[in-house]
Image (cartoon, rainbow, N blue to C red):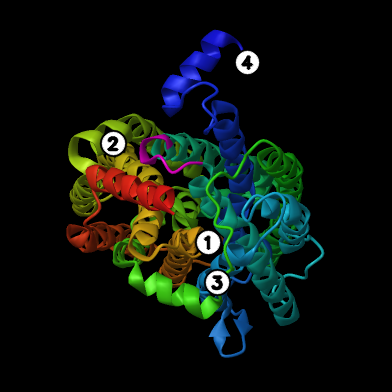
Amino acid sequence: MNSKINGLLHKLYGTKPDDGNLQPKEALAYGIAGFGQNFICTIIGSYLTIFLTDALLFGADGVTIGTLTGSMAVAYLMLGTRIFDAFNDPIMGSIVDKTRTKWGKCRPYLKWMAFPIAIMTIACFLPVFEAKAPATFIIIAIVYVIWSVVYTVADVPYWGLSTCMTNDTVVRGNMLTITRLLCTLGAGIVTVFVPIITGAVTAKYKYPDTAEGIAQIMADKGVDAEGAKVFVGTVIKGMEVANANTLKWTYFIAAVVLVVAAVPMFFYGFKNTKERFTANDNPPSLGHNLKLLFKNRELLLIVLSGILGGARMVYTYTGGLYFAKYVLQNEGMYSLITLLVVPGGLVASVLVPWMSKKFTKKWAYIAVHLFGGVVMAIMYFVGYDAPWKLIVAAIALVLLGIPQGVNNIITYAMIGDTVDYLEWKTGERGEGICFAMQTLINKIGMAVGAFIGVISFSAAGINSETGFISTEGANTLWNMLVLSGVISMFACAVPMFFYRITEKRQAEMVAEIEARKAAK
């Protein structure tokens, strides 16, 4: 690297040149792997639901899966699979803690799992599935469950790797700050460009739903009044089928492109990182790891906070896309919704190191979520049904990027501190089981986001085949998306009032750990 750039990176990460510890090249490689990982995570987390409801038309009127409507079946699939997957994370964490290879215990999973994740991601969006068919739903449900398990096998060790690379809480916090920024950028690219593309390729299938529009169709085709009803129904039905088929292929191509881009980044992260702090003693059993988990009081508080906060950003998941597509009548507006959050996230990436040093991670976390709850409450009471109200909502979204960004960065750093806490308390680090809790939090958040999104879709009475939504339905969608966020923002702050690890205490624990090792 150029010496000036290298010097800047050392300053950015808080590292020292050639001291045998973490170096900027490694930290960047770690972040690049996360950047690619979020291509895959986001195409599944943000768009598989709408692929099912809008491309495969399980959100259309009259579609049933067993005793459930199609949209409710999708909602329960998203919720059930993610919760099942989340509770697999402790199992995977235990497997990671038992892994012993020449590459370490976390790194090798970046190498081993790149291609399985790629294959299963593409399988979720295969365009050969038949619309509305119960058999299609069952097949995709099975594929999605397999994808979630495969993804977990890579995700848990990836985040655990950060504690194996360095035990300096400041350096690790800086690395995770930049990594989360890169992850957010990767997710942002997908959430911004995919709806723009899908909106553009399906625009020609939009049909007029006003009397004037229908009259114009009749006039253009020379249809008399008697044949109007049959003709218009035929035209609309043809457009609906063409729209769904185009969506199927568009999501499939997007998945393939993102997977091809992401896989090399997994291998780059594997090749250019190093594990320095990995236990070499006898690997623990799952039962032993679960006992360790319940000895880690501080980690359990973070987990409880994460679960309570599962709905805080629900509007950035499927529900926000439904709102843009059916209420704002512009799918591309979802890109704007996600972009509006970005400035606040960038501010957060700058604020986190300063806030952590000035107020501690704990109080920074609490403060930004209380702030987010107030902002969302204002957004809820103001509403959306006037231009000035939409401007207020846009400003609120910018401000909400701050708690979202702080949460994305600071939670990982706090869990890293709980790994040190666990080693100080028990003599065992347990990176795998500890960071399994972070992926559990993430997956529960995705589950809640997708579930509330599709439940809102159903409660709003949306028909994905015709694109119809009533004014009452639009209000229902808004209320469910925003009010759930208000409650979740306030609720997630409560457990953290009882969290006890400070930056000073973490440094003292690490010093005690090193002294014990030296004494042995």
Foreground: disc 1 or disc 3: 3
The boundaries of the magenta stretch are: 166-171
Q: Residue furthest bottom?
A: 67
Residue picked out by circle 4: 1
Circle 3: residue type: Pro
Circle 2: residue type: Ile
Residue picked out by circle 3: 284
The answer to whether residue 152 is magenta is: no
Choose the circle earlier in sequence order: 2 or 1: 2
Coordinates of residue 189 in the picture (x, y in percent): 57, 37
> Residue 31: which quarter of the image?
top right
Q: Residue furthest front?
A: 519
Residue picked out by circle 1: 432
Q: From the viewer's side, name the closer residue of 427 and 35.
A: 427
Choose the circle earlier in sequence order: 2 or 3: 3
How many angstroms separate mark 2 from mark 3 (CA)?
Answer: 49 Å
Coordinates of residue 352 in the picture (x, y in percent): 31, 36
Does residue 414 appear left or right of residue 127 in this picture?
left
User: Looking at the rendering, in which quadrant would you find the N terminus?
Assistant: top right
Circle 1: residue type: Gly
Measured along the vertical axis of the image, is residue 35 above or below residue 103? Answer: above
Q: What residue appears at the point 64 percent right and 57 percent down from the top-left corner?
A: 154
Circle 2: element type: helix
Does residue 366 appear left or right of residue 279 in this picture?
left
Residue picked out by circle 2: 395
Q: From the viewer's side, name the closer residue of 405 and 88.
A: 88
